[in-house]
């Protein structure tokens, strides 16, 4: 009798929520509590794009303030990796470019939109023994931080379709040997999903 009640209870609980939903909920809570990497996206508009839109991705020359030295074109590289999964027609600039140069490149490629990005802030905290040996500053221990800014511009009209800021911070379980640029991939992929109307 007890085993029958246990099986029925498990079936009822199993019918309420899938295991994948439980895992997603646990991951969200761990990110929110600071144990895993976490990103927050603030969009100016909620416009959606068609999946066959041709997007050209470029990054500005701006060097982020803060204690970090990310690769010069890392935001464009990470954005390309996130966008190519959802938008089949995506290209990126090979190197950083000013806004006018990036717009000219996008138009020359025949793109509908320019996704122009910059690394606005990066803080590479001490996360390894070697970094501690180099800096030995107690208040530099901790998780990395980054802020990137994005502008989605229509190439024909130069209309600003969307302006976005993504703030990311590392987690206490993932901060070992991490860099601020390691935080960029997941929120940029989520941003690409949001542009075609998909949730997280």
Image: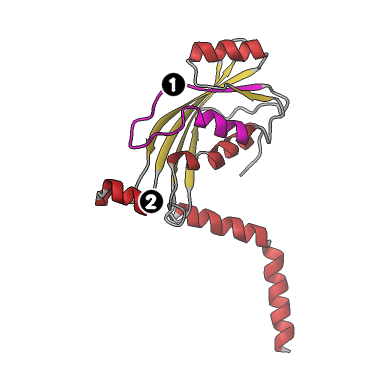
Residue 155 shows up from this direction:
no
Which quadrant of the view contains residue 156? Answer: top right
In the image, residue 199 sits, relative to residue 20, either above or below, namely above
Q: Is residue 145 left or right of residue 12?
A: left
> Observer-nearest residue: 195 or 147?
147
Cα separation between marks 1 and 2: 27 Å
Residue 117 drawn above or below residue 30:
above
Q: Earlier in the sequence, mark 1 or mark 2?
A: 1
x and y percent of residue 163 in the render?
50, 25
For label 1, the crowd category at 10 Å Cα-Cα, with few meaning under 14, some 14 to 19 and many 20 or more, is some
Q: Position of residue 7 (x, y in %)?
A: 73, 79
Question: Which mark, residue 61?
Answer: 1
Left or right: residue 87 versus residue 61 is right
Numbered disc 2: secondary structure: loop
Q: Which label belongs to residue 103?
A: none
Residue 2 x, y percent position in the rendering: 70, 88
Give yes or no for residue 101 being in the magenta stretch: no
In this picture, which residue range is highlighted in magenta?
55-81
Q: Residues within 10 Å of mark 2 (few under 14, many from 20)?
A: many
Q: Where's residue 152, x and y in %?
A: 56, 22
The residue depicted at 61 percent of the width and 44 percent of the height is 200
Instruction: Tell which of 45 and 179 is nearer to you.
Output: 179
Q: Residue at x 59, y 10 (%)?
A: 157
Numbered tag placed on residue 127 in the rendering: 2
65 to 135, vertically: above or below? above
């Amino acid at each position: 009798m007890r085993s029958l009640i246990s099986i029925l209870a498990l079936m009822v609980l199993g019918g309420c929520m899938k295991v994948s939903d439980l895992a997603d909920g646990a991951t969200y809570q761990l990110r929110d509590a600071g144990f895993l990497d976490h990103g927050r996206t603030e969009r100016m508009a909620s416009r959606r794009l068609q999946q066959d839109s041709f997007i050209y991705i470029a990054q500005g020359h701006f060097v982020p303030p803060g204690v970090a030295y990310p690769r010069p074109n890392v935001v464009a590289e990470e954005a390309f990796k996130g966008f190519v999964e959802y938008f089949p027609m995506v290209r990126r600039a090979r190197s950083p470019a000013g806004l006018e140069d990036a717009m000219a490149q996008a138009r020359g490629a025949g793109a509908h939109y320019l996704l122009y990005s910059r690394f606005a802030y990066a803080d590479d905290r001490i996360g390894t023994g070697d970094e501690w040996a180099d800096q030995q500053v107690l208040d530099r221990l901790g998780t990395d931080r980054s802020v990137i800014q994005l502008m989605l511009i229509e190439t024909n009209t130069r209309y600003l379709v969307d302006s976005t800021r993504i703030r990311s911070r590392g987690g206490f379980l993932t901060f070992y040997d991490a860099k601020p640029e390691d935080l960029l991939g997941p929120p940029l992929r989520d941003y690409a999903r949001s542009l075609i109307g998909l949730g997280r």
